[in-house]
């Protein structure tokens, strides 16, 4: 059975959770392969809205084994709040597995994140201050602590204590307030004990699933142009959300990846600082924010909005070897008289737009391709023609059932 990878093709917030939720029905495992609790995924089921940060979106299906892979950095307080919230709403997390190789986030990472960002002044990156970057930094420096370390409680406590003392020196040097090492040790002794039953050798587990011909879905957080190597550096995240990161972050080799789905909105958004060629800073941008409810799931921050950029999308196709696209939030454009799509940049790097007529029709209840207005179908056809791969899913509303299978 194929391994499916779901990748954000823009700057994140493309509606990956809805697509993952749709695809999960035909898979046995949903595996998160990078990022941390700085990524928010929202799934709407009837009148229920589920906002997920760490637990893979497939948890809403009872048959799914949700897996937090080795490439993720895990904030334990957030993880357990999420588990408690889901189980309080009748969603079991009993099958959840956390890679023994996944690195843990600690209070010193969050303190340092805030101090680093403050020191940047007007050059702020726009980090969520969740400690993600410093945790990955410790991983690269080979001084981080991993989920598997909690299985030896005495050694884990001593390692937490030593790390806290070590990081306090840097915190104090940056003008911050040092942490109470013993309080941190006590907090993480309790958290570590709770984590232990979820810890597993997920690389071995996933390969055993492949040997059984199980279908696996690998879920990225953030998106292509927030990738540490391929994004709009330095305004990027601290890991690799691209399809190559799915291999590293799960231990599944590239020959298993046969379906790579890129998710793009019908327009573009990004959070925080960084370049944005098609950004709208006028009333049209405000309209996209209002209709699309473009505020961060995790931070609540207002997203910057603009027209769809197909130059970026073509690059995302190349970087990720995308086999298909899922085009989300097409309904947000329902009330526009005309819709613009960037098809190229001029010699000065400014976007050149194709201008299409709007469809001025509510498509939120549409589930059939033939029921879409002709102008909406023309919009999708333009995207396919320009990027060179098929659009397979079109999102027509916020609800779980609001989509069209394109053919």
Image (cartoon, rainbow, N blue to C red):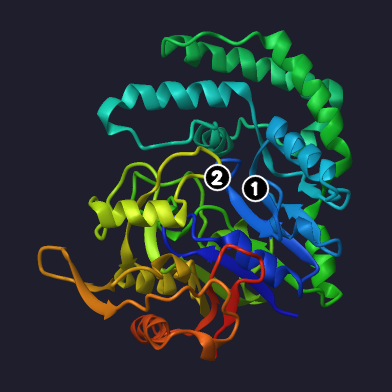
Residue pointed to by mark 1: 51
Q: Tell me what residue is drawn at x 28 percent, y 32 percent.
A: 123
**Looking at the image, can residue 156 be seen?**
yes
Q: For numbered disc 1, what is the local secondary structure?
A: strand
Q: What quarter of the picture does the C terminus occupy? A: bottom right
Residue closest to the far front: 361
Q: Nearer the viewer, residue 9 or 365?
A: 365
The picture quadrant where one finds residue 246 is bottom right
Along the line of sight, the residue nearer the viewer: 194 or 210? 194
Q: Is residue 381 above or below residue 266?
A: below
397 w.r.t. 322: above or below: above
In this rendering, position of residue 294 left or right of residue 182: left
Q: Quick check: 338 left or right of 399?
A: left
Q: Is residue 70 above or below residue 103?
A: below
- Residue 380: image location, x then y, percent: 42, 82
Counting other residues with Cα less than 10 Å from the Cα at mark 2, is it few (<14), some (14-19), or many (20 or more)? Answer: some
The quadrant in which residue 260 appears is bottom right
Residue 3 image offset from top left, x and y in percent: 69, 73
Mark 2 and mark 1 lie on one chain; the one further toward the N terminus is 1
Q: Quadrant of the N terminus?
A: bottom right
Task: Between residue 35 and residue 79, name the one nearer to us.
Answer: 79
According to the picture, the residue beneath numbered tag 2 turns out to be 297
| On screen, residue 377 above or below 204 | below
Closer-to-camera residue (128/322):
128
Residue ID at (30%, 54%): 285
Q: Residue at x 71, y 60 (%)?
A: 45
Separation (CA) of disc 2 from disc 1? 7 Å
Q: Residue at x 41, y 25 (%)?
A: 116
- The answer to whether the residues at label 2 and label 1 have Cβ atoms under 8 Å apart is yes
Mark drawn on residue 3: none
Q: Secondary structure at mark 2?
A: loop
């Amino acid at each position: 059975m194929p391994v499916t990878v779901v990748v954000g093709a823009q700057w994140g917030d493309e509606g990956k959770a809805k697509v993952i939720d749709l695809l999960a029905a035909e898979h046995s495992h949903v595996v998160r392969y990078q990022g941390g609790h700085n990524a928010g995924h929202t799934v709407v089921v009837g009148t229920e809205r589920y906002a997920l940060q760490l637990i893979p979106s497939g948890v809403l299906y009872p048959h799914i084994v949700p897996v937090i892979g080795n490439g993720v950095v895990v904030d334990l307080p957030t993880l357990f709040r999420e588990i408690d919230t889901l189980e309080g709403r009748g969603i079991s997390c009993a099958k959840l597995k956390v890679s023994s190789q996944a690195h843990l986030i600690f209070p010193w990472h969050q303190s340092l994140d805030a101090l680093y960002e403050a020191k940047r002044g007007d050059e702020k990156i726009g980090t969520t201050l969740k400690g993600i970057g410093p945790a990955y930094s410790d991983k690269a420096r080979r001084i981080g602590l991993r989920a598997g370390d909690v299985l030896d409680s005495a050694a884990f406590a001593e390692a937490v204590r030593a790390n806290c003392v070590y990081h306090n020196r840097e915190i104090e040097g940056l003008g911050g307030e040092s942490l109470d090492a013993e309080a941190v040790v006590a907090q993480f002794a309790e958290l570590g004990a709770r984590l232990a039953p979820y810890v597993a050798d997920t690389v071995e587990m996933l390969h055993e699933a492949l040997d059984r011909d199980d279908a696996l879905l690998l879920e990225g957080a953030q998106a292509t142009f927030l990738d540490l190597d391929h994004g709009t550096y330095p305004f990027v995240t601290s890991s690799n959300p691209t399809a190559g990161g799915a291999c590293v972050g799960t231990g599944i080799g590239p020959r298993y990846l046969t379906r790579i789905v890129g998710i793009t909105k019908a327009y573009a958004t990004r959070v925080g600082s960084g370049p944005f060629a098609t950004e709208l800073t006028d009333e049209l941008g405000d309209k996209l924010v209002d209709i699309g409810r473009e505020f961060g799931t995790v931070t609540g921050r207002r997203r910057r909005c603009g027209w769809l950029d197909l130059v970026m999308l073509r690059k995302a196709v190349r970087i990720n070897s995308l086999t298909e696209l899922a085009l989300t939030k097409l309904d947000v454009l329902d009330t526009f008289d005309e819709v613009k799509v960037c098809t190229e940049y001029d010699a000065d790097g400014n976007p050149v737009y194709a201008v299409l007529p709007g469809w001025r029709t509510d498509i939120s209840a549409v589930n059939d391709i033939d029921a879409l207005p002709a102008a909406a179908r023309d919009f999708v056809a333009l995207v396919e023609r320009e990027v060179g791969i098929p659009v397979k899913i079109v999102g027509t509303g916020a609800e779980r059932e609001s989509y069209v299978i394109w053919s």
